Structure formats: structure tokens, C-alpha cells
Amino acid sequence: MKLIIAAIKPFKLEEVREALTAVGVRGMMVTEIKGFGSQSGHTEIYRGAEYAVNFVPKVRLEIGVSDAMADQVVDAISKAARTDKIGDGKIFVLELAHALRVRTGETDDDAL
């Protein structure tokens, strides 16, 4: 099993969710986060004063999938989240040692 963690632009969330549903993903966790990378933030003017915005809003997705689905899920996220502009995000794929569905007690692939 794999745990896929993706940080994407917030306005791309619904498009990514639709793409993941189309490839068979049945659930994911979503968290609003802030971060910086190549974008390195930017400056804004508020009430006449300029200030630095060092962290940019992003959305973090966490998706547990079978090994066989991992590449397909990464591809779906990558295509749906892409704007071809700086700050499109990152995708990480980690080994998932164990999963358990609390309601039924199902484990590992059955719990996904």
C-alpha cells in the first residue's frame, strides 16, 4: 500500500477530486495548509502599508491506495492540479505499513 500526500493550489481541489473519483479513489483527507517553496511568498499592500506574505495557502491531500493504483493516482493529481505556473505543488509517495477501517475492523487493502 502507498500513502500519497499532495500539496496543491486551493482552487484546484474540486478538479482534483473529480479526477481521483474517475480513477476509482473512494476517499481522501483534505487539510488547509500554508507553505513556501519556489514561490517564496510575495508582497501585498493592505491599508497603504506593504507587507510580506511568506507562506502561501495550499491544500494538503492524503490518500491511501493499493500499490497497483499509486501511479494512476499520482498521474491524475498531477494532470488535474497543473496550471503550468510556479507554485502548482508537490506530490509525495510513501510506503503505508498498515490501515484499519474503524467501523468494520477491515485491514490493509480491504480498509482502503
Image (spheres, rainbow, N blue to C red):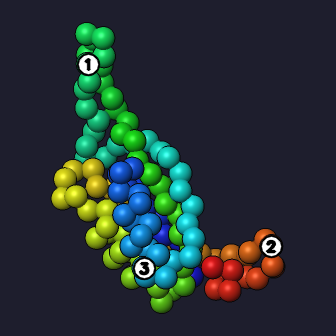
Taking depth in this image into account, of 8 and 108 the one nearest to the observer is 8
Q: Circle 1 sits on which residue?
A: 45
Q: CA distance from mark 2 to mark 1?
A: 49 Å
The crowd level at tag 2 (other Cα within 10 Å; few <14, some 14-19, many 20+) is few
Q: CA distance from mark 2 to mark 3?
A: 25 Å
Secondary-structure class at tag 1: strand
> Residue 50 placed where, x, y %?
26, 16
The residue under the point 42% across, 79% down is 22
The answer to whether 99 is drawn above or below residue 46 in the figure is below
Q: Which mark is residue 112?
A: none
Eye-nearest disc, 3 or 1 = 3
The answer to whether 108 is drawn above or below residue 61 in the figure is below
State which tag comes first along the sequence, 2 or 3. 3
Eye-nearest disc, 2 or 3 = 3
The residue under the point 37% across, 69% down is 77
Q: Circle 3 sits on which residue?
A: 22
Q: Circle 2 sits on which residue?
A: 103
In the shown orientation, is residue 57 left or right of residue 67?
Answer: left
> Residue 46 placed where, x, y %?
30, 16
Give the amino acid at mark 3.
Ala
Asked whether residue 20 is in view, the answer is yes
Secondary-structure class at tag 2: loop
